[in-house]
Image: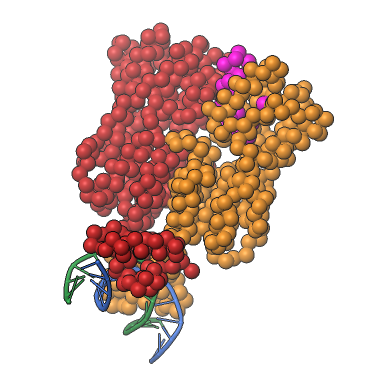
Chain colours: A orange, B red, C green, D blue
Amino acid sequence: MRPTIRDVARRLNLSITTVSRALDGYADVAENTRRLVFQTAQEMGYSPNRAARQLRRQRAETLGYIIPSVSAGFADPFFAEFIAGLGDEASAHNYDLLVTTASPASPAEKAAYQRWAQGGKVDGMVLNRIYLDDWRLRYLAGQGIPHVSLERSPSQPDFVGIEADSYTGFLELLAHLVNQGHSRIAYIGGNAELKIDHDRYSGYLAGLGAVSILPDPVLVARANLTPQGGYQAAGHLLGLAAPPTAIVCVNDLTAIGAMHAAHERGLKVGRDIAIAGFDGIADSAHTQPSLTTLDIPVYNLARQLVIMLLALINGETLPDRQVKIQPILVIRASTGG
Amino acid sequence: MRPTIRDVARRLNLSITTVSRALDGYADVAENTRRLVFQTAQEMGYSPNRAARQLRRQRAETLGYIIPSVSAGFADPFFAEFIAGLGDEASAHNYDLLVTTASPASPAEKAAYQRWAQGGKVDGMVLNRIYLDDWRLRYLAGQGIPHVSLERSPSQPDFVGIEADSYTGFLELLAHLVNQGHSRIAYIGGNAELKIDHDRYSGYLAGLGAVSILPDPVLVARANLTPQGGYQAAGHLLGLAAPPTAIVCVNDLTAIGAMHAAHERGLKVGRDIAIAGFDGIADSAHTQPSLTTLDIPVYNLARQLVIMLLALINGETLPDRQVKIQPILVIRASTGG
DNA sequence: CTGAAAGCGCTTACAG
DNA sequence: CTGAAAGCGCTTACAG
């Protein structure tokens, strides 16, 4: 049987009030008493029952993150890194992280958000893979649930979180490719309603415009952010009568699939065709050839998001409610770099 | 304000007892009453407060998994897939999944297990990356906390979980390589105390023994299960006076790093050198060349583990407390397949 | 500086 | 078939 606060109090002939206050660091407890309480609690292996504390404090001391899984059984290493950051920072503050997966905009996703938000399971939520019009953001705002997001929805009235400037990133990437002599550059995106697709696609178009290349709609494909999707989309692009000489992809996984497709067609990536991604996942440095990418520090972004969320939950004022970061263009062999 | 059971009861002029029982599906509630209660609860947006229910039931309705992160900021896609399976199956049973990360055998890891187990935060835990002598297993068994694991520790008296037969898998893999004409075959493992390393290394040795090849200690390297580690270890092996013609790796990530090292030395993987991994992560099909691997259905294994854990928690008898599965040898271009 | 008491929102014997 | 009451383990005004 786990000891309760009552057991500790009894052992010391103190009231549970005093034990609770001693453990919680209240100032009005005799130093001697406090020491005794700590020591005894330690000895007895006492730690407060979370459910009781939550019920009383009306707080869960738990953060939530719902992985927007595109397909059952598939997982982007991006998420693993993101979760690791979330989990590490949360536990550094004695918060827990609740995780589940749900397909974007599915009934299951709605159910999960409602269960957690209304059920008081979490004090706040972290979101990413934001949509241009995102019901989750509207829902959480409507319910007054603290939340932060990686990426910002244009429909979001009061955004707290971090934005990676994908637009400028892609602009830079395009300049690099143009510099390498490419003019027939394709784009493989994800769902066009995704904020990341929107920004990166805009950056792609702007990059073409900067050197007066007329965008060719034939060179734009959209997949589902997986290697499988990138493989198929690239297969299609490379089968065109006038195929592209470069392909920029909305994320690294898509690019990895695209490299596979190119390779299968006997093309040497980096020489016959340039391919680039976005995210800077650990694998990108070890693909064959290594992958040019726009690197964002996913792990650290996740930690930063938790810090912001905690401030929100505790009603503290944030120095910066909105942080913007620049992805770093990492030029590698896949674009002949 | 979230409505409580009291609000629902008041609205219907019923006692909270009846509302609770109706919602929980007790048989002794008038059908008419039940319908009314459900409808009203729905309308009012009522869902039971988790903390209160947990406190009363002395159950968390939550499962825990602590990611054994080898280094901050790094995450194996294996874990993402594993977590996705855990999360999906848990939520299918209205359970939640609590996640954090901790370095194996670190004080932080101990603290996390204690906090969750003793703090009553979780009803049970899922473990993987088991060590030959694993303090976590001993601790949980000692505390009587239900738990299941992927891989079994030899020191575990009462194992419930799933074992992948890595030994036989590596035996098969070695036979395949020998069949391709290789005799100088290297092994890159992880920590030698890891069960997966132990099994796979044993399979490697047995595979050599089966064709009377004397194992050469020079050809055995150990890294940390990351591409970075595999890259360095392979670099070392390939720099030997008599380098191997084939390298088998404890996991896919290590193999991906090894391929990188080979490539950098001007070797064509699949022709000049054979490389293989283990896990069958999604990326393995899209590396250049595609990676021969021993595939295990990580996502489904995770789901199965949750089912087993839930049975354990509910005191049900499991048809099979110990499940053994065979990894499937997927021969791809990296071994000239 | 310490303690008695209320109450967070449920579930569940028990009584009728 | 329904309800009154106890109690899960805490925290926190309030009193002294």
In the rendering, at what x and y percent does residue B203 appear? 32, 22
**Magenta highlight range:** A247-271
Residue at point 44% right, 20% down? B292
Question: In the rendered picture of this protein, how many numbered marks are placed on residues?
Answer: 0
Q: Is residue A141 above or below residue D8?
A: above
In the image, taking residue A286 as reference, residue B292 lies left or right, namely: left
Outermost residue, front side? B32
Q: Is residue A262 highlighted in magenta?
A: yes
In the rendering, at what x and y percent does residue A203 appear? 72, 37
Outermost residue, right side? A212
Residue at point 66% right, 52% down? A155
Outermost residue, top side? B181
Residue B183 visible in the snapshot: no
Residue at point 64% right, 22% down? A237
The N terminus of chain A - image quarter: bottom left
**Which sits in the foreground, B27 or A189?**
B27
On the image, which quarter does residue B319 sit in? top left
**Which sits in the foreground, B247 or B83?**
B83
Residue B200 visible in the snapshot: yes
On the image, which quarter does residue B294 sit in? top left
In the image, taking residue A196 as reference, residue B166 lies left or right, namely: left
In the image, taking residue A312 as reference, residue B11 lies left or right, namely: left
In the rendering, at what x and y percent does residue A194 appear? 62, 42
On the image, which quarter does residue A35 sit in? bottom left
In the rendering, at what x and y percent does residue B53 appear? 34, 62
